[in-house]
Image: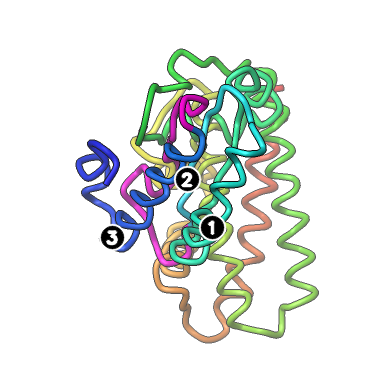
Amino acid sequence: MAEGLSELTRDLPRDVVRVLSDFVDAAREAFDDDLLSVILYGSAAEGALRLTSDVNVIIVLRAFDRTKADRLHGPLQVAQAAIRLAAMFLLQDEIVAAARAFAQKFADILRRRRVLFGEDSFLGLAIPRSALVVRLDQVLLNLALRLRAFYLERGQYEEQLVGLVAQAAGPLRACAASLLELEGRSAESPKEALRRVTESLGEAGWGAVLTRLSEARETRRLPPRVAADVVMRLIELAGQMRQRVLALG
């Protein structure tokens, strides 16, 4: 097991810890001194991993050497199949550019990350406010477009709509956390941020929507004929959040 990893992953499921540890060991062996850090981020770093969650990691490298990278094919495929590992391979000199281009993702990474190996490559990283406003608007718009399209394409399939609701939980919560930060406020977690954003809308019914959102994410189940209504409310929510982002811009 990678040195110190058991302490960093003590609140994760045992199978996730085992596979993640094996992957970190494999990355260290494959990339050798080109490997600067392995950073866990998202719900796993928050200790809130659910059935629908990916296990997200960033591998920060000095260089991407083909011979070294080839050694990681097998371990990566095993981890992807076993725990839905989603890996980003980022060069050290790409960090600032990536944070600008994908400001919303990196804002969430800064909020929720654990260093599993090496240095904290994101310590001191600053995301320009203007970049975050633009990217947050894009993410919310894209989410609304995807929800509408999926609803029309698969709306007659209840189980698939429940899966869509579950997948929307993470992006909406992360967007809410960024929105609060841009407005000069904060929350203890992205989940709490979304609750605060919906409360500030001053409309009834959002509490029930958030309950269904959590239920879908945690269990992949909703009562019959509920998912379609939730999807429509999430489309509405994405639009209202986007209007607040545009007002900031």
Q: Which residue is mark 1?
A: 74
How crowded pointer 2 is (Cα within 10 Å; few <14, some 14-19, many 20+) is rated as many
Q: Residue at x 62, y 77 (%)?
A: 160
Circle 3 SS class: loop
Q: CA distance from mark 2 to mark 1?
A: 38 Å
* Frontmost residue, 53 versus 7: 7
Q: The residue under label 2 is which amino acid type?
A: Leu
Q: For the residues carrying marks 2 and 1, which lies nearer the camera in this image?
A: 1
Q: Tell me which label, 2 or 3, sits earlier in the chain.
A: 3
Q: Nearer the viewer, residue 225 or 19?
A: 19
Label 3 amino acid?
Pro
Which label lies toward us, 3 or 1? 1
Reading the image, the residue beneath label 3 is: 13
Query: Within 10 angstroms of label 3, few (less than 14), some, or many (20 or more) residues?
Result: few
Q: Residue 102 versus residue 96: which sits nearer the camera?
A: 96
Q: CA distance from mark 2 to mark 3?
A: 26 Å
Residue at 34% in and 52% down: 48
Q: Is residue 143 visible?
A: yes
Magenta highlight range: 32-53
Q: Indicate whether 192 appears above or below 119.
A: below
Determine the secondary structure under disc 2: helix
